[in-house]
Image (cartoon, rainbow, N blue to C red):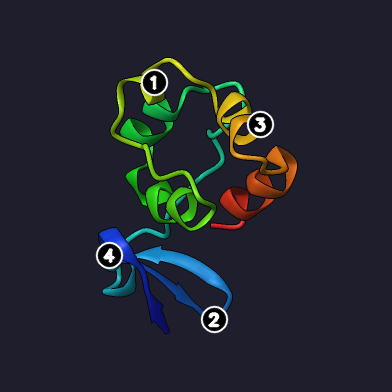
Amino acid sequence: MRMYKNNLALFRGKYYTKKALYGRKETDMTGVTKDMTIGEILRANPEVAPVLLDAGMHCLGCPASQGETLEEAAMVHGIDVDELMKVIEEM
């Protein structure tokens, strides 16, 4: 098991929150879309933060993240948004 920031862990190929590892619900990322702003994604699913940070998006708390979509942020950072979405959906 590999622990990430914000108590997110990779365990047997799936991402879990710390709470999920202790018998609670597995993290559900089905509602995340590339048209959502970074702020919306983080408010709904804070567990996504380590994935975005690992992808090179280090300005998650900056004002631009409140109005920039995941697709726009990926473009600015030179990241393939579809690949990023696959990682998020696998959580």
Question: Upstream in the sequence, badge 1 or badge 4?
Answer: 4
**Helix, strand, or loop for circle 3?**
helix
Say which residue label 3 marks. 75
Label 2: few (<14), some (14–19) or many (≥20) C-alpha neighbours in 10 Å: few
Across and down, in percent, residue 36 comes to 52, 23
Say which residue label 1 marks. 64
Q: Which mark is residue 40?
A: none
**Picture layout, residue 59 above or below residue 90:** above
> For the residues marked 1 and 4, what is the alpha-carbon distance in whole angstroms?
25 Å
Specify the amino acid type for callout 1: Ala
Say which residue label 4 marks. 7
> For the residues marked 3 and 1, what is the alpha-carbon distance in whole angstroms?
14 Å
> For the residues marked 2 and 3, what is the alpha-carbon distance in whole angstroms?
31 Å
**Helix, strand, or loop for circle 1?**
helix
Specify the amino acid type for callout 2: Arg
Specify the amino acid type for callout 3: Met
Kindly report which numbered mark, 2 or 4, lies closer to the viewer in this rendering: 4
| 35 sits to left or right of 83 | left
> For the residues marked 2 and 4, what is the alpha-carbon distance in whole angstroms?
16 Å
Q: Is 17 in front, or is 79?
A: 79
